[in-house]
């Protein structure tokens, strides 16, 4: 039986390969239940969407178990490298973390990343000592450039953010996994448990998701299903699938039977 190694990013080890978000939940109570059901050990928070004036239970941060979950502030809503860098500095000043999910968008409709601005921001943030996990396209060359800049992981999209379309280009995800020397985490586009399992079967190191859980009819149940799907997909990858064939192959061969 193949043995597995835990997910390790920038020297920190995680028991779960699922990273979860904090947006779009119907309430903070539901968000907390989903975090618990998911088993995730890292949670990403949109810094620009935090209500810094909120206190106690009115504050999102009150509902996040920071003792159990690694905070990963993100730069959602930023459309330039400068904005993203300022947002990371704000997260650091708030005492959140120097680990950041770098997200620099280039288009309001598709929410695809602006590759040029993402590379520019990553270069600065890495030099300033941030642990950078960048959201990027499913482009092999961009992934390699981000890795070479010193990013701690690369996070290619599966499909547009919040679309639920699943893995649109599995071939490119495989190519990124092949060249990457840092963890590859599929980010954006997962819609249901089978999408998460497929992502993991491609050999990626983890999956980051938010909308698929937050907007499900039963968010906590979906969170648990995603936990199981990520685990199952990883096991299937390690087990090794059978080759695809054009024709049938009998489960009980008759070759060699005595007539």
Image: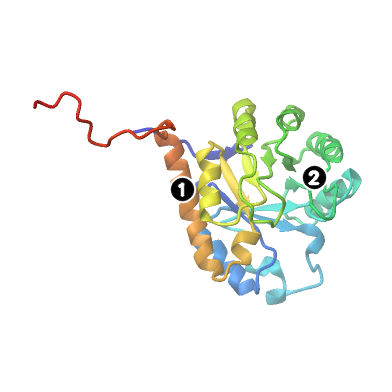
Q: Are marks 1 and 2 in contact (CB under 8 Å)?
A: no
Color scheme of the displayed model = rainbow
- Image quarter where the C terminus lies is top left
The answer, for residue 98, to whether it is visible in the render is: no
Check disc 1 and report its element: helix, strand or loop: helix
On screen, residue 79 versus residue 231, left or right, reads right
Across and down, in percent, residue 2 comes to: 38, 32
Who's the residue at 65% across and 74% down the image? 27
Task: Give the side of residue 45 with respect to residue 90, left or right.
Answer: left
Q: At 83% across and 49% down in the image, what residue appears?
A: 89
Q: Which mark is residue 231?
A: 1
Residue drawn at the location 65% of the way across and 61% of the way down: 211
Other residues around mark 2 within 10 Å, as few (<14) / some (14–19) / many (≥20): many
Q: CA distance from mark 1 to mark 2?
A: 28 Å
- Report the disc number at residue 74: none
Left or right: 65 in relation to 227:
right
**Residue at the extreme left:** 259
Residue 41 placement (x, y as % from top left): 56, 53
Q: Which residue is mark 2?
A: 113
Instruction: Examine the image and state in which quarter residue 254 appears.
Output: top left
The image quadrant that residue 250 belongs to is top left
Q: Position of residue 91 (x, y in %)?
A: 79, 54
- Name the residue nearer the viewer: 48 or 200: 200
Q: Is residue 72 visible?
A: yes
- N-term mark: 1 or 2: 2
Compared to residue 204, the image places residue 231 above or below, namely: below
Q: Residue at x 59, y 47 (%)?
A: 207
Residue closest to the eye, 108 or 186: 108
- State which quadrant residue 126 falls in: top right
Looking at the image, the residue that sits furthest to the front is 259
Say left or right for 248 vs 98.
left
Q: Position of residue 24 (x, y in %)?
A: 69, 67
């Amino acid at each position: 039986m193949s043995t597995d190694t835990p997910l390790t990013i920038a020297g920190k080890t995680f028991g779960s390969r699922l990273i979860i978000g904090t947006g779009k939940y119907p309430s903070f109570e539901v968000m907390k239940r989903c975090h618990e059901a998911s088993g995730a050990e890292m949670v990403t928070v949109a810094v620009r969407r935090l209500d810094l004036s909120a206190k106690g239970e009115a504050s999102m941060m009150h509902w996040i178990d920071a003792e159990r979950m690694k905070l990963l502030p993100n730069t959602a809503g930023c459309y330039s490298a400068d904005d993203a860098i300022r947002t990371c500095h704000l997260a650091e000043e708030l005492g959140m973390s120097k680990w950041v999910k770098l997200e620099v968008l280039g288009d309001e409709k598709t929410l695809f990343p602006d590759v040029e601005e993402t590379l520019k921001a990553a270069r600065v943030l890495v030099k300033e000592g941030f642990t950078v996990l960048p959201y990027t396209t499913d482009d092999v060359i961009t992934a390699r450039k981000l890795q070479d800049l010193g990013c701690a992981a690369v996070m290619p999209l599966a499909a547009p953010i919040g679309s639920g379309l699943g893995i649109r280009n599995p071939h490119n995800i495989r190519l990124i996994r092949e060249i990457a020397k840092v963890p590859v985490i599929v980010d954006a586009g997962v819609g249901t448990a089978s999408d998460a399992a497929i992502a993991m079967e491609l050999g990626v190191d983890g999956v980051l998701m938010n909308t698929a859980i937050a907007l499900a009819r039963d968010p906590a149940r979906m969170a648990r299903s995603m936990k199981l799907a990520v685990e199952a997909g990883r096991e299937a990858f390690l087990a090794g699938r059978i080759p695809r064939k054009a024709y049938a192959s009998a489960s009980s061969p008759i070759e060699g039977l005595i007539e």
